[in-house]
Structure formats: structure tokens, C-alpha cells
């Protein structure tokens, strides 16, 4: 199968969140199953083309925008540890900038940037003469490519039998654009913009809706989130549209690249460990973590550590943590380790927390890949009170490292974390349902009650470490959906 994967984030070149990891491992795994994919990504200013071995090609793209043509040059490289070609779209005006999305997720011309990119994706296939069986677009930024596939490029021989698949990573970011700009840039024109057209939502162009409507199949990143978003509470205003396409909407659980995220072969953590020496392994990593944060050795190093590695945004339930955390730290009930960056009101709060409780608050504000591994390995629990969570990766990392999740039962947490049962010894985490700090506190209390209490403490961590969310499984599920999409296109041709 020929697959063209289009994305604005791709690890290790350009990462803001989980999207980058998934777009990295899917083609890597597909290659192992004999599929041939290419990945298309904008060439941002911060991508070090020398370091990653990207070369300019002599291929120029002619990209129709509004009434004129704009240009881009293609660069080519490879996904590390694979032979998957990665094509970078070079255009100085749109992508020679320091951020993927801009500060607070918005450059003012993101409509134009992403419509340009979507059109450039189609032109890339054309100049390469790459005939995709599947055009796989991720999130709203690439959604317009699916509209182009089903209109301007429909009878182009390159795309004659191409099926379009759209993957929703987070419904909260939709790409809501001014119609006069977006309809013109995309060349569809205002004639295609009318109430309830596939471009229109609440009087604006909604790129997420465009992706949902033009795709042959739609996937999202966990089975439970696929159900949730069909209700108004989680649907971010698009639940009716999602119900309309309900027969083609599938939830596929994200996976983890265990080659990078496993305590037995993690290149970042000070002490590697397996399920057979997890007690010692975790203790050594914990002590190293405490040392790294200059926690004095006279203070009790065996206090539990609860951690979180997260974007500091409302979605992640930071308000619930803020509501309760001081009580715990002031009473030496546990230490809190946080690695995060995001909204300044949250960043400031955690700086304050570290100042007030220097021995119990281990805070690092910023983005740090290496530290994310060290914190997850060295902590006992990971606290995840998200308001909503399409899938979530860090609970799966936590499970693999024997770091027990305390999670709110929403989105992907429902598919991945199972409440520990003291009677049966089954389960691997502690959960709560309501978005409420007292319910979270009760789950924390249950979690702390089994800390170093055997046999529970060893059982729960072994249960956790044995769970399997491998990227290989995820990649196979996508291939199944691709086959359904192809069948749909064949039938309609
Ligand atoms: P989301 O995609 O909503 O941010 P996920 O849990 O799906 O949430 O993925 C977040 C990814 O980003 C994980 O791989 C996590 O380890 C990583 N991450 C988040 N914040 C940081 C940070 N400050 N430093 C390093 N890695 C981070």
C-alpha cells in the first residue's frame, strides 16, 4: 500500500505534543509490514537540516492559492531508524518562523499557512509521481488536503484510486477561519460557502469539519474518545457532524514506542530496570531524581513521589492539582515532581510552590525530553486529572515504568487505566470520575494507602509493567481502517 502521511508535527524534527510521536512511529511500523509511505512536513526554521541529513531536491512545487501561484521547494530526508522518506516543504514566508503554530497556538495567518501546506501536499505527490492509495491527514492543519482530493484532484491519474483518512488528535483545536480569506485562498471561492456546506460551521470556515466531511474514514486516538465526542459535552460543537459521519468514525488507541520508552533500555535514566528488579531499580532512580533537584539527604527520601509531565493548559486538570497540592506538601504526605510548560498563570503558580516547599516540590518549567524520562522512572505515581483527554501518552509511559497512574476516567484513560482491586489483585491504577478536587483527593488517598504495603505494592506495579500498548498494534489497526477506506472508494468509483 502507498501511504502519504501529512502532518505539521513529526518527531524528532518538530514536536509540540503527542501528535509528533504518533506520526513518527506509524510509518516506521508500517514499513516493517511492507507498506511504502512518505511523510510530508513543513520546513520550519528550527529544523536542523544538516543534523538530520536533509538535502534540497531540484523539485519545485507550483501551489495555486487564490488567483495566483506560489512556490515551494522540496527537501528530502529520512525518518531516523527507517527508510521512510520525509519531504520538507520549504517556503520562507510561511514556515521560516520559530514556532509551529505561533504563540498561544496562533499566527494570524494560520489559515493561509495551513491551506498553502494542504495544497502543497497534493502537489508533492504530483511532482514525485507518488500515487497514494491512502492520503492520511492529521488534525485540522492538513484537513483541506482532503477537500482538494475530492474536488480539484479527483480526476487526476495520481489520485484516481486514493482514499482519504482523517485522524483527530484533539477536537479542541479546530482551525476556525474567516470565510472571505479561507475560501479564497483555498480556491473553492465563496460559492461553496453557504449554511451547512461542508466548509461552514457557525458562520465560519471550520477546518476540522472540512476534514471530517471530506474523509472516507475518520479516526481518533482512543475508542472511548471516539464515543465521547459524539456527545455535546466533549464534541466541542462538532458532535452533530461527528454523529452524521458516525458510521465512518473509528477510535484507535495510540501506542507507545517501547524502544524509547521502556525502563530496561531507556537511554536517559540513570538506572535501568526490569520487572524482576523493579524495587531496587525504582529506588535508585528516585534517589537520583531527588539528588538532581538538590533535595537534602536528611529529609525522608522514601516519601512517595507523585509526578506529572504535561502541557500546562486547562485541559490537563491543573486547577484540581492547585486546589489540593499545598495541603499534601505542607503535611509531608508526598513529594510532587512536575515537568511542564504552558500558560503563565500555571507556570507562576508552580514556581511559587517550589519556593514555598523547596524540599517537597520538584518543579521544572520548560520542555525537556531527557528529564521527562528521569521523572517518570523516578516517581511512584503519575497524577492525571484531565478535564478531557483524547488518548494521553504519559499514563502509558507510567504503566510501563511501574509508576502508578491516578487518573480521571475520561477519554483514553478509560481505555488504559484500570482501578486496582485490593481483593482480587487486579488493576494497575487509581481512578475517579467527576471533575472534582475532592474525588481526586480520594483517589490519591487510596493510592497512598498501598504505598510500600505488600503484597499490593509489588502486584500493582507488576500488573502495570506487563500491560502492552505497543505501537505495532496501533499501526496494524490503522492498516485495517485503510483497507476499509479503500474498499469504500473502490465501490464508489
Ligand atoms: P498532549 O498531546 O495533549 O500534550 P499526550 O499525553 O498525548 O498529551 O502527549 C504529551 C507528550 O509530550 C508526551 O510524550 C510527554 O512526555 C511530552 N511532554 C509534555 N510536556 C513535556 C515537557 N514539558 N517536557 C518534555 N516532554 C513533555
Image (cartoon, helix red, strand yellow):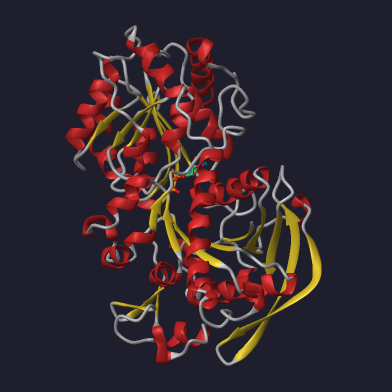
Q: Is residue 329 above or below residue 303?
A: below
For image coordinates 37% across by 40% down, the residue present is 350
User: Could you tell me if residue 338 is visible in this image?
Assistant: no
For image coordinates 59% across by 21% down, the residue present is 264
Q: Quadrant of the N terminus?
A: bottom right
Return the residue nearer the eye: 144 or 336: 144
User: Could you tell me if residue 417 is visible in this image?
Assistant: yes
Return the residue nearer the eye: 97 or 148: 148
Residue 442 point in image, percent of width and height: 20, 27
Farthest residue toward the front?
491
Q: Is residue 109 left or right of residue 173?
A: right
Q: Is residue 197 left or right of residue 261?
A: left
Q: Is residue 116 above or below residue 253?
A: below
How many marks are shown on the rendered structure? 0
Q: Quadrant of residue 214?
A: bottom left
For image coordinates 66% across by 74% down, the residue present is 158
Farthest residue toward the top?
454
Residue 126 point in image, percent of width and height: 69, 74
Q: Quadrant of residue 360?
A: top left
Residue 405 point in image, percent of width and height: 36, 29
Q: Is residue 93 above or below residue 301?
A: below
Q: Is residue 469 left or right of residue 404?
A: right
Residue 444 point in image, percent of width and height: 26, 26
Amino acid at each position: 500500500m502507498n501511504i502519504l502521511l501529512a502532518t505539521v508535527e513529526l518527531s524528532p524534527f518538530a514536536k509540540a505534543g503527542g501528535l509528533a510521536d504518533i506520526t513518527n512511529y506509524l510509518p516506521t511500523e508500517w514499513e516493517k509490514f511492507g507498506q511504502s509511505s512518505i511523510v510530508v512536513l513543513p520546513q520550519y526554521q528550527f529544523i536542523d537540516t544538516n543534523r538530520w541529513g536533509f538535502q534540497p531536491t531540484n523539485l519545485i512545487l507550483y501551489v495555486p492559492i487564490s488567483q495566483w501561484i506560489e512556490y515551494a521547494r522540496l527537501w528530502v530526508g529520512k525518518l531516523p531508524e527507517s527508510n521512510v522518506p520525509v519531504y520538507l516543504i520549504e517556503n520562507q514566508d510561511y514556515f521560516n518562523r520559530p514556532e509551529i503554530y505561533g504563540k498561544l497556538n496562533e499566527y494570524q495567518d494560520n489559515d493561509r499557512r495551513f491551506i498553502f501546506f494542504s495544497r502543497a501536499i497534493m502537489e508533492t505527490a504530483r511532482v514525485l509521481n507518488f500515487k497514494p492509495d491512502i492520503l492520511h491527514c492529521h488534525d485540522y492543519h492538513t484537513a483541506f488536503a482532503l477537500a482538494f482530493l475530492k474536488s480539484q484532484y479527483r480526476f487526476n491519474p495520481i489520485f484516481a484510486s486514493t482514499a482519504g483518512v482523517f485522524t483527530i488528535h484533539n477536537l479542541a483545536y479546530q482551525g476556525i477561519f474567516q470565510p472571505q480569506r479561507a475560501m479564497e485562498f483555498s480556491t473553492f471561492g465563496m460559492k461553496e460557502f453557504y449554511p451547512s456546506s461542508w466548509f461552514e460551521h457557525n458562520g465560519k470556515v471550520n477546518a476540522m469539519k472540512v476534514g471530517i466531511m471530506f474523509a472516507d474514514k475518520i479516526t481518533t486516538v482512543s475508542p472511548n474518545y471516539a464515543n465521547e465526542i459524539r456527545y455535546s459535552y466533549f464534541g466541542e460543537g462538532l458532535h452533530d457532524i461527528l454523529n452524521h459521519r458516525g458510521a465512518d468514525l473509528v477510535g484507535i488507541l495510540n501506542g507507545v514506542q517501547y524502544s524509547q520508552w521502556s525502563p530496561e533500555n531507556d537511554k536517559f535514566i540513570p538506572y535501568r530496570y526490569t520487572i524482576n528488579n523493579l524495587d531496587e531499580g525504582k529506588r535508585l532512580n528516585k534517589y537520583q531524581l531527588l539528588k538532581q533537584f538538590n533535595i537534602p539527604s536528611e529529609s525522608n527520601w522514601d516519601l512517595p513521589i507523585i509526578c506529572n509531565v504535561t502541557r500546562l493548559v486547562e485541559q490537563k486538570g491543573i486547577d484540581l492539582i492547585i486546589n489540593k497540592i499545598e495541603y499534601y506538601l505542607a503535611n509531608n504526605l508526598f513529594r510532587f515532581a512536575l515537568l511542564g510548560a504552558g500558560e503563565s498563570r500555571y507556570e507562576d503558580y508552580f514556581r511559587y510552590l517550589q519556593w514555598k516547599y523547596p524540599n517537597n516540590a520538584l518543579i521544572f518549567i520548560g520542555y525537556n525530553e531527557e528529564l521527562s524520562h528521569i521523572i517518570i522512572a523516578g516517581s511512584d505515581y503519575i497524577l492525571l486529572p484531565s478535564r478531557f483527554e483524547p488518548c494521553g501518552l504519559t499514563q502509558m509511559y507510567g504503566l510501563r515504568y511501574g509508576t502508578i497512574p491516578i487518573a480521571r476516567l475520561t477519554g483514553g484513560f478509560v481505555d488504559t487505566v484500570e482501578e486496582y482491586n485490593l481483593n482480587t489483585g487486579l488493576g494497575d491504577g487509581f481512578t475517579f470520575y467527576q471533575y472534582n478536587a475532592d474525588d481526586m483527593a480520594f483517589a490519591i488517598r487510596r493510592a497512598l494507602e498501598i504505598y510500600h504495603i505488600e503484597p499490593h505494592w509489588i502486584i500493582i506495579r507488576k500488573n502495570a509493567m506487563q500491560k502492552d500498548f505497543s505501537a505495532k498494534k496501533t499501526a496494524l489497526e490503522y492498516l485495517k481502517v485503510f483497507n476499509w477506506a479503500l474498499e469504500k472508494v473502490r465501490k464508489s468509483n
